[in-house]
Amino acid sequence: MMPRSHRLTAVTLAVFAVTILVSSLRAQQGPPPAIRTAHGDWYWERGPADLVLEHGKVVTVDSAQPRAEALAIRNRRIVAVGSDAAIARYVGPDTKVVDLRGRLAIPGFIDAHAHFMGLGESLKQLDLMGAPTWSDIVRKVAEAAKEAKPGEWILGQGWHQAKWEHPPHPAVEGLPLHASLDAVSPDNPVLLEHASGHAAFLNGKALELAGITDATPNPKGGEIVRDAEGHAIGMLRDNAQGLVRRVYQSYLDRRTPEQVRADMAETVRLASHDAVSTGVTGFDDQGESFATIDFLKEQVAGGKVPIRLYVEVESMSPDSLALHLPGHWLVGYGHDHLTVRAVGEILSDGALGTHSAWFLKPYADLPSTSGLNVTPIDQIRAEAEVALSNGFQVTVHAIGDRANREVLDTFQRIFREHPDAKDLRWRIEHAQHLDPADIPRFGHMRVIASMQTLHACSDGPYVVARLGKERAKAGAYAWRKLMDAGAIIANGTDAPVERLDPIPNFYCAVTRRLADGELFFPEEKMTREEALRSYTINAAYALFEEHDVGSLTPGKLGDVVVLSKDIMTIPADSIPTANVDLTIVGGRVVYRRTDGSR
């Protein structure tokens, strides 16, 4: 038998050995959890990462640690941000390490206002955005007509009469006549969507199929543009587009269910690729039908959507919303790739480019009109009430100063009637032209201004002509005035109205420089930090996602964009030359530039 003293020594040694073993295991596992996500998950600070970015300039958009050299991502989330030396301990045998070589890494861009399926569809159509004249558009239609099957519709998107080098001849309000399209496409219907999405131009065949004659009345909230003799020229504004959209939908309905699904899947693929290739990791899709939302849910479940979609339910009758909204609430589905918790974009008016934005005073260059109220204000209020009762956010399109005032008044009445409703984050989409008296209301009412900074540079050449210099200076794209009043601005592109690419948007935000070099009311421009915040943490806030994305903060999802040039410091005029080298979503590289990327 072992002496008692020896037995105690042995027990002591055994306890000591177990203690060492436990300590060793704890050291391998890391310290007690120190990071908790918005979903309540805990993450360890130590241990090998799945992905490490090192040797770069990391701009975090996190005031607690604004700059760093490296970061580590594990299990889709950021576990550490810091110096190269600090992050080196996260590199294990299976860690993928990316040498940034001094490049800029920022949070993934979040487009707070765009049209996902519309973007994908536009990539299948004639691209008319850069067409310098109407004649160039006619030539593109002529080429398409030669290849088209009998009766096949020819679609195009992106034209804007205010951006042509010279007006067509003959013309009505600077717009062409459909006879020019009839000459090159007499048998195939042609539907060309305006860049704003608030008008379409048709050829004679499409007008015929839509049943539009000289006697056809204007639908409520829309206009059939006519010449002096009362003949329809081919231009349909806002709700008048419904006359042809119904006919085109009947044409599409001839497809088999298999063809429909294949076409929709291709639309998703094209839009997704456009997003990741431009550094967009989060996308607020401004309005889809319940059927499309169901399809997107299937696509997300199948891993077909590499970005994070925030899909809004399209505007419809209050009764339809009340019936279907409860069954479509969805947050963080598919590893945080799909959320459905908003109704929008409800159209209160049209667009500046089509003279259908709704103003308090007539247009300076078309005094016969002050624009259009597209959705009656009573219906907007009814839809908003249904959304509120179901816990959904509300987003309303308003471009003209009267539209913005009417929407603010509607929101204010609802807020007063529901004082217990908190943190609603209701939004006005565009908020482009404001009466100075309404600017402070955004901050006071906590209404988010969901704006698209590129619109200022895109529209700038004709804004003064539309409104006059005094009105334009007082409230056109008034970013600085809004921010000074305490408003939150969330940025986006309105793609396919503009290209999805955030770089031109960022450039316009910080310069307000037009194509001819002129500065468009430059006192309203943003700093680079403000512009980046509007496209990251502010946009995340507008989507109720600021606890998960929008900054490179430990615990948040690992959504990162690596740029070829440092847009935060290079000369402003060099910003447009920056490219997206890498797009990372949840720690997974979903895009890598191959044309010159390091």
Image (cartoon, grey):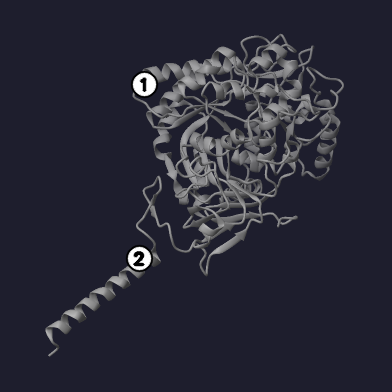
- Number of labels in the image equals 2
In the displayed structure, would residue 30 be above or below residue 11? above
Report crowding for label 1: few under 14, some 14 to 19, many 20 or more residues within 10 A (C-alpha). few
The foreground one among 37 and 17 is 17
Residue bearing the label numbered 1: 418
The label number, if any, that marks residue 115 in the structure image: none
In the rendered image, residue 473, in percent from the top left (x then y), is placed at 68, 16
21 left or right of 125 in image = left
Closer to the chain start, of discs 2 and 1, is 2
Is residue 214 visible in the rendered image? The answer is: no
In the rendered image, residue 145, in percent from the top left (x then y), is placed at 81, 40
The foreground one among 52 and 393 is 52
In the displayed structure, would residue 33 be above or below residue 500? below
In the displayed structure, would residue 381 be above or below residue 142? above
Specify the quadrant that holds the N terminus: bottom left
Specify the quadrant that holds the C terminus: bottom right
For this orientation, the residue located farthest to the front is: 5
Amino acid bearing label 1: His
In the rendered image, residue 380, in percent from the top left (x then y), is placed at 49, 21
In the rendered image, residue 541, in percent from the top left (x then y), is placed at 49, 35
Residue bearing the label numbered 2: 26
Tell me the residue at 45%/17% (across/down): 412
Determine whether the residue tagged by mark 2 lies in a helix, strand or loop. helix
Report crowding for label 2: few under 14, some 14 to 19, many 20 or more residues within 10 A (C-alpha). few
Amino acid bearing label 2: Arg
